[in-house]
Amino acid sequence: MVGVLSNQVDRMDIAAGDHIYSWRTTYLYAHHGIYIGDAMVIHFTKAAGHEIGTGTLLDRFLFSSSLATEGPPCQKCGHLINKQQGVITSCLDCFLYGGNLYMFDYAVSAAFFLAKARGGTCTLAASDPADVVIHRVQHLLNNGFGMYSLFKNNCEDFAIYRKTGLLVETSFSVGRSGQLASLTAAFSAVASSPLRFLTTSAGGLAIVTSGMYSVGRYVSDIGVRRDVIKVPVERLVEHWSRDPAPASQQRRQECHGDGHGGCVPVSRS
């Protein structure tokens, strides 16, 4: 587990199957991927300039791709890249794109999670074994991970599914991304909380807003949410092709790994 103040790690500290990320655009957001060893990373991206789908100039600043779009191909990974979007393989240098290397934490305590004020750095959910993670990521490299969506299916969602096998089953909420959960929690804390009217002091308002923000982040975490199911990677396309039933009509499933990225489902009310 990395520190509370920073998740930054050295290259020698990461191993195959680790979830890594690097901050972009003056720490505005982070790009996530799965390290597979030999200084290579598999990650989910969309063509630079079109990631968030706003259709405005903002798209050119909030780019999710870690690959340079100009200049000669990378000597180490250029021959591996036959597409500029979707699930791709690139070397660690291209993935970092000049940024620092950070490690995403799994199975953290509630206290540790709440101490990390910035979302998209850790989760209460536990990671599956490294061999299962690598199996999932290799399968999705060959079969894709659906359409990129900033709110429902982004690079962090990709990495979290690779590590946990968990998918959000409801269609009306954001995906697994802690970054978007933090943004949603921040807006909710400021705009939606009736508790903000209980105090007129700046200090009291700050405490109320901070508390609502922390609660919003916590209940949105993939390790706490009740609207998630564990889906074997081989059945992922089948899962996406059907309309999910409302969460109230389904029971959350937990799976015991079969050693090949699949699972034996065990239902729990």
Image (tube, helix red, strand yellow):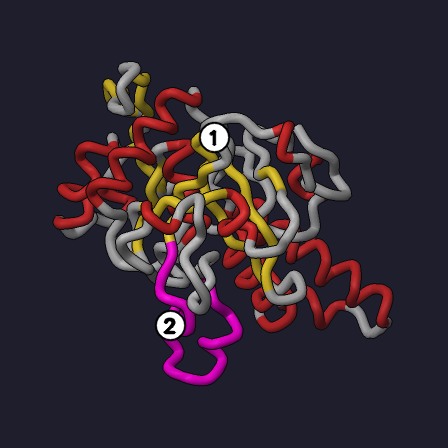
Residue at point 54%, 47% (across, down): 93
Is the residue marked by circle 2 packed among few (<14), some (14-19), or many (20+) residues within 10 Å?
Answer: some
* Residue 160 in the image, given as x and y percentages of width and height: 43, 40
Number of numbered markers: 2
Q: Amino acid at mark 1?
A: Asp
Judging by the rendered image, the residue that carries numbered circle 1 is 38
Q: Quadrant of residue 49?
A: bottom left
Q: Nearer the viewer, residue 133 or 110?
A: 133
Distance between mark 2 and mark 1 Cα atoms: 30 Å
Residue at point 24%, 49% (across, down): 246
Marks 2 and 1, the one that precedes in the sequence: 1
- Residue 51: in magenta span: yes
Would residue 201 be found to the left or right of residue 36 on screen? right
Would residue 38 be found to the left or right of residue 242 on screen? right
- Residue 240: in magenta span: no
Secondary structure at badge 2 equals: loop
Q: Which residues are magenta?
A: 45-64
Would residue 44 be found to the left or right of residue 24 on screen? left
Secondary structure at badge 1 equals: loop
Residue at point 48%, 57% (across, down): 66
Q: Nearer the viewer, residue 60 or 2?
A: 60
Q: Amino acid at mark 2?
A: His
